[in-house]
């Protein structure tokens, strides 16, 4: 082995499965004057190698077939919201993940295929409808099987699932699921809108101004402490809070029904 490398000013060692004369490697490295040695391998490619082709894999040259960055941002923005809504509706962790995946696929496919346009209406109610129906579908699949009417005594009062002497009234923990979903959706939507607005404001204002707001308004640090830490006056800390809160209100109100 020592004789192989001795007497050479420089060596580049490359290991590949099958040799093509190292043409690609030499081109990528800009090697114009070099010698390459190809050594045999004990591996029998003809008998032991397998080629697997995925029939539905998109062509890498067709970028439109791949998920764009906007879709990744969409999942990041709304995925956690769907999980929280599914949890509030009593779905198991596994079902929550399934619902999130179905909602994301349905919404992204509709957006990419232009089945939703701004002219059709606001994004918020459109997206809410998708989430609601996917959650209801999951709840229906997992719902316990109803007791056949023939198995319930005819004199059993409504809401009672057994004979009167041993009756147990079943109280629905969600007397109006639709109204509860509306309230939960609105709360989660406001969280998403706030975080999005906060991210936009953070990019717009001076870093020191945002840091003063973050320490004072979000982390409850005393204004005197924040001012001393950042080298600002206490009045500047108050102004930073007021300025950013004003911008946040404007952005949250402006994005309440905006498209993604």
Image (cartoon, rainbow, N blue to C red):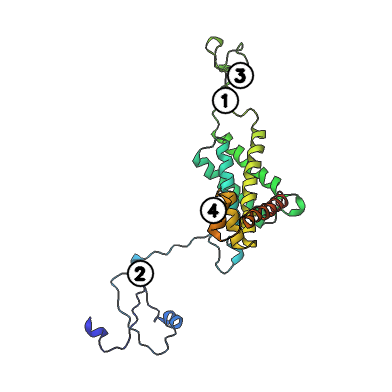
Residue assigned mark 2: 46
Residue at left 59%, top 41%?
85
Question: Counting residues from the N terminus, which is met first, the one under dot 1 or under dot 2?
Answer: 2
Q: Residues within 10 Å of mark 4 (few under 14, many from 20)?
A: some
Q: What residue is shown with label 3?
A: 159
Which label lies toward us, 3 or 2?
Answer: 3
Q: Secondary structure at mark 2?
A: helix
The alpha-carbon separation of the residues under discs 3 and 1 comes to: 13 Å
- State the residue position of label 1: 146
Q: 10 Å neighbourhood of mark 2: few (<14), some, or many (≥20)?
A: few
Q: Give how far apart the Cα atoms at labels 1 and 4 are.
A: 62 Å
Residue 207 found in image quarter: bottom right
The N terminus, quarter of image: bottom left
Say which residue label 4 marks: 225
**Looking at the image, which is closer to me, 128 or 136?**
128
Across and down, in percent, residue 3 comes to: 22, 85
The foreground one among 222 and 167 is 222
The reply to whether residue 208 is visible in this rendering is: yes
Q: Residues within 10 Å of mark 1 (few under 14, many from 20)?
A: few
Q: In the rendered structure, are the residues bearing label 3 and label 2 in contact, judged by CB atoms less than 8 Å apart?
A: no
Dots 4 and 3: beta carbons under 8 Å? no
- For marks 2 and 4, the one nearer the N-term is 2
Q: Nearer the viewer, residue 118 or 46?
A: 118
Nearer the camera: disc 1 or disc 4: 4
Q: Residue 181, how many percent across, how many down?
A: 64, 37
Left or right, residue 149 beside residue 247: left
Please name the residue shown 40% across and 79% down the image. 20
107 in relation to 15, above or below:
above
Q: Residue furthest right?
A: 119
- Marks 4/3: CA distance? 60 Å
**Mark 3 surroundings: few (<14), some (14-19) or many (≥20) residues within 10 A:** few
Residue 47's mark? none
């Amino acid at each position: 082995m020592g004789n192989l490398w001795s007497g050479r000013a420089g060596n580049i060692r490359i290991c590949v499965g099958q040799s093509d004369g190292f043409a690609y490697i030499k081109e990528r490295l800009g090697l114009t004057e070099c010698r390459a040695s190809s050594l045999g391998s004990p591996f029998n490619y003809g008998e032991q190698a397998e080629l697997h082709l995925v029939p539905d894999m998109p062509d890498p040259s067709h970028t439109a077939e791949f998920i764009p960055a906007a879709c990744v941002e969409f999942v990041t923005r709304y995925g956690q919201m769907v999980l929280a809504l599914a949890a509030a509706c009593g779905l198991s962790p596994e079902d929550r993940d399934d619902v999130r995946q179905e909602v994301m696929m349905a919404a992204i496919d509709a957006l990419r295929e232009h089945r939703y346009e701004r002219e059709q209406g606001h994004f918020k109610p459109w997206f809410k409808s998708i989430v609601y129906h996917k959650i209801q579908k999951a709840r229906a699949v997992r719902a316990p099987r109803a007791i056949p009417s023939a198995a319930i005594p005819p004199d059993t009062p409504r809401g009672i699932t057994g004979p009167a002497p041993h009756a147990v009234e079943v109280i629905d923990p969600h007397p109006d699921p639709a109204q509860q979903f509306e309230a939960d959706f609105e709360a989660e939507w406001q969280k998403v809108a706030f975080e999005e607005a906060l991210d936009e404001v953070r990019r717009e204002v001076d870093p020191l101004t945002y840091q003063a707001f973050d320490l004072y308004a979000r982390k409850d640090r005393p204004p005197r402490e924040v001012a001393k830490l950042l080298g600002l006056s206490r009045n500047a800390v108050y102004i930073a809070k007021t300025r950013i809160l004003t911008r946040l209100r404007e952005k949250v109100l402006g994005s309440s029904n905006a498209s993604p």
